Amino acid sequence: MSDKGQQEPSMEEILASIRRIISEDGEPAKSETQAPSPPPPPPPPPPPPPPPPPMVEEDDDVLELTQMVEDEPDERPDFGQPEPDPWADEPSFPEPSPPPPPPRWEEPEPEPMPPPRPAARRPMPAFDDFEDDEPPPPPRPRRRMVDPDDGLISRRTAEDASHHLTHLARELGDDLSIGPMPIGIRTVEEVVRELLKPLLKEWLDENLPTVVERLVQQEIDRMIRRSQKF
């Protein structure tokens, strides 16, 4: 701490340096001829710190049981008698009474509901009481299952048709067999084919939808039976 005090200049040194700078600025020529001034003396050392206060022994603060403790005087200030209240003589107003409670509306008790009356059971009518005015529908005709190996027409129909066609061909042949068959005369097959075309067309127009429906239904039934097996 003493070294720090020696390094820091005092207020007097600062003032002396300021005066020297001012004098040097006022007399530049004189300062050039004069020799430089010696450095200022070092500042005096700071005074030593004061000695610490003596330590008080702790034994003095300990209260022994043999010592008497004196009562400390009451140092509370005496405020004297209180000043009279100027508002004490004024009439006092009674405190307002609390507001009455709001009226309570008592809800009427609900009337008890009468017990539900059991529903009267009606006797179930017998099945004989119902009279069926409408006649039962006729039974649906069962379709005859056709073997897929069979043709489009039955065997009896084919035989009848073949018989008629043979008879027709025989009659035509008798009419044309007057002499040797010339070249260009149509054969029986050609005549039969030509006669069968309109008949076959008419028959197909009339019966082909039914035949197709029957065959489709047959195939559907066959697929259903096959799926039920698996």
Image (spheres, rainbow, N blue to C red):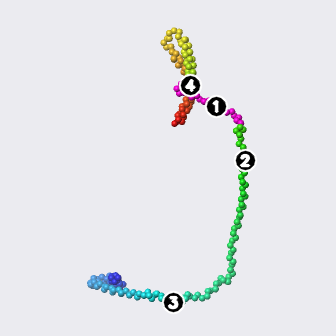
Q: What's the mark number on residue 69?
A: 3
Q: Name which residue lies at 53% across and 9% down.
A: 178
Question: x, y percentage for residue 70?
Answer: 52, 90
In the rendered image, residue 138, in percent from the top left (x then y), is placed at: 65, 31
Between the C-alphas of marks 2 and 4, the distance is 68 Å
Structural distance between the alpha carbons of marks 3 and 4:
150 Å
What segment is highlighted magenta in the picture? 131-151
Taking depth in this image into account, of 119 and 154 the one nearest to the observer is 119
Circle number at residue 120: 2
Residue 163 is left or right of residue 28, and the answer is right
Amino acid under disc 1: Pro
Say what secondary structure mark 2 lies in: loop
Residue named by callout 4: 204
Residue 198 shows in the view: no
Q: CA distance from mark 3 to mark 1?
A: 137 Å
**Amino acid under disc 3:** Val
